[in-house]
Image (cartoon, grey):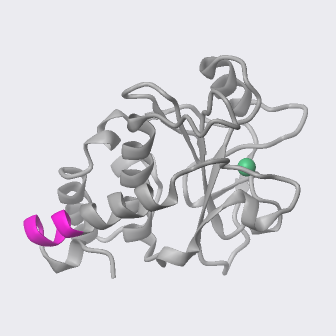
Amino acid sequence: MLGGLGLPLTAVRISQATQLRGILPALIFLKDKPAKYQSARRSGVKVDEIVLHATESGGDQTASLNYLSHADDRQVSVHYWIGRDYGLIYSMVPENRKANHAETHNDRAVGIEMYQLDGFKGDYTDWQYNAVSQLVYEIRWRWNIAKDMVVPHSKLTSQRGDPKNFDWSRFNQSIDMISLRALVTLGPDFALS
Ligand SMILES: [Zn+2]
């Protein structure tokens, strides 16, 4: 199963997903780091939202990743974690299962955490912009998720301000470029509508 996502894809869709991976090179680096706090999604709820997060806890990124794999104090988790350095990207919860990252939205949402060195500087790396754009593109394509359903955690709760200082216009331009490349090189089935 591509990327260990556990999705019920048809043979055609699996073949298409493999083709799409060819223009999403950051996803070659995806590794598994299973999170302890995950559960079944409520049946009948469609996955239709992607929530972007950024850590604000400081410390080193390996400690942050390890914490999210067994956050015994807060029982939080995310589907994906993207570190600051080239090649650092982990799948922690399969998308067809629920992670604990977005309060009442957990049943419908896929959560992506970016490790941020300083929450106030907006110091995301080029790797993080590339990786999150490619990852979000693939998730939107697989689940048919609308652009306006990719949201910051801060939109869902006044308690959290993350991802602070994330450059949404850079991110959206990157997604548009991937969609154009997908259309030109692979065909209309691969572009986002
Ligand atoms: Zn968050």
Instruction: Tell me, yes or no, if residue 1 can be seen here.
Output: no
Q: Overall secondary structure of the magenta stretch?
A: helix
- Find residue 179 and report its image quarter: bottom left
Q: In the visual, does 17 lie left or right of 65?
A: left
The residue positioned 34% from the left and 57% from the top of the image is 174
Query: Residue 174: in sight, yes or no?
Result: yes
Q: Residue furthest front?
A: 121
Q: Residue at x 49, y 28 (%)?
A: 84
Q: Residue at x 31, y 67 (%)?
A: 176
User: Residue 162 placed where, x, y %?
Assistant: 71, 50
Q: Would residue 32 be found to the left or right of residue 73 on screen?
A: left
> Which of the pair 67/85 is nearer the observer?
85
In the current view of this chain or complex, which residue is farthest to the left?
Answer: 185
Q: Is residue 72 above or below residue 27?
A: above
**Image point (57%, 61%), residue name:** 96
* Magenta span includes 114: no
* In the depicted structure, whether residue 94 falls above or below residue 108: above
Q: How many marks?
A: 0
> Residue 33: percent from the left, percent from the top?
56, 31
In the rendered image, residue 172, in percent from the top left (x then y), is placed at 41, 64
The foreground one among 8 and 33 is: 33
In the picture, measured across the screen, residue 60 lies left or right of residue 2, that is right
Q: Position of residue 153 (x, y in %)?
A: 71, 58
Q: Quadrant of the C terminus?
A: bottom left
Query: Closest to the observer: 180 or 27?
Result: 180
Q: Give the residues drawn in magenta, as a range.
A: 180-186
